[in-house]
């Protein structure tokens, strides 16, 4: 089992200007583990591609996240990427009774029917603290009753043999399945769920101030 938790980062989500284009810019790349000094394992690198998208058909805005891992990955490995975050525009949440951190997990396991591909699933959870300061004890997590993260059969399935999520290992195919793998999921910027942070840019006098996802 391989599980990875994000280090502290700060990532701008997007301004909610409801433009007529579907995509608001190219994905932005954020390094999580990019060099040997930060890596717990030799040769491991991990980054995220983050993009904000407006859907003309539904009027929904989404944050779309792709985790990419470079490592020696076995077919028996189960990989889970966790994204724990708060909202810059909503810093006054009740950390004890509501939520201190929102969280989404993107999980990968080999497709038993076709080992060229991997199956994606998601978990939606949130953290609460024992005190408002969140410093005396570790936050505890609870699974959200509604899973607002979408992946796999709910969004993008790993089934394209020309663009598989797993890059086949080039040097040790007996031991390892992949040398690189990606996990893609998304959620609405405003899910309407009381246990999710919403990203709602402010509009004051026609001046739009971006909200931000604070990851850590």
Image: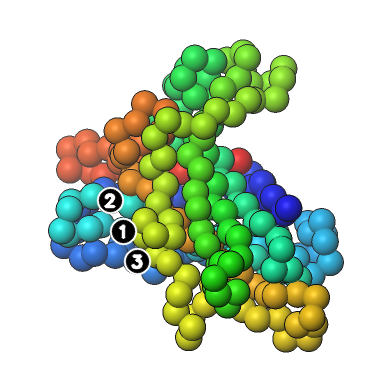
Cβ–Cβ under 8 Å for marks 3 and 1: no
Q: Residue at x 31, y 58 (%)?
A: 53
Q: Residue at x 55, y 28 (%)?
A: 142
Q: Nearer the viewer, mark 3 or mark 1?
A: 1
| Residue 129 visible from this viewpoint | yes
Q: CA distance from mark 3 to mark 1?
A: 8 Å
The residue depicted at 52 percent of the width and 32 percent of the height is 143
Tag 1 or tag 3, which sits nearer the N-term?
Answer: 3
Q: Mark 2 falls on what kind of element?
A: strand
Q: Residues within 10 Å of mark 1 (few under 14, many from 20)?
A: many
Residue 99 rendering spot, x and y as whole percentages: 49, 24
Sequence order check: which comes first, mark 2 or mark 3?
3
Residue 74 at what x, y percent from top left?
Answer: 73, 68
Q: Which residue is mark 1?
A: 53
Where does label 2 land, which residue? 61
Q: Quadrant of the C terminus?
A: top right
**For residue 73, above or below residue 163:** above
Q: Nearer the viewer, residue 105 or 97?
A: 105
Counting residues from the start of the chain, the first of labels 1 and 2 encountered is 1
State the mark number for residue 25: 3
Tell whether label 3 touches label 2 (CB within 8 Å): no
Disc 3 is placed on an element classified as loop
Whether residues under marks 1 and 2 lie with C-beta atoms below 8 angstroms apart, the answer is: yes
Q: Disc 2 versus disc 3: distance between alpha carbons?
A: 13 Å
Distance from Cα at disc 1 to Cα at disc 2 = 6 Å
């Amino acid at each position: 089992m391989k599980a990875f938790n994000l280090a502290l980062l700060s990532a701008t989500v997007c301004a909610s200007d409801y433009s007529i284009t579907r995509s608001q810019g190219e994905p932005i790349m954020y390094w999580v583990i990019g060099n040997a000094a930060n890596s717990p394992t030799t040769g491991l690198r991990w980054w995220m591609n983050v993009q904000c998208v407006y859907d003309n058909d539904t009027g929904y805005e989404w944050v779309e996240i792709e985790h990419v891992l470079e490592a020696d990955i076995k077919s028996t490995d189960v990989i889970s990427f966790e994204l724990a975050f708060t909202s810059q525009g909503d810093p006054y949440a009740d950390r004890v009774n509501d939520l201190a951190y929102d969280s989404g997990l993107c999980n990968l396991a080999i497709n038993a029917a076709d080992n060229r591909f991997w199956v994606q699933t998601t978990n939606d959870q949130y953290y609460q603290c024992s005190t408002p300061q969140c410093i005396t004890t570790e936050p505890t997590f609870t699974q959200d009753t509604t899973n607002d993260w979408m992946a796999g059969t709910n969004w993008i399935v790993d089934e394209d043999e020309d663009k598989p999520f797993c890059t086949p290992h080039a040097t040790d195919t007996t031991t390892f399945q992949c040398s690189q793998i990606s996990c893609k999921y998304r959620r609405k910027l405003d899910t309407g769920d009381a246990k999710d942070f919403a990203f709602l840019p402010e509009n004051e006098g026609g001046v739009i101030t971006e909200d931000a996802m604070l990851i850590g």
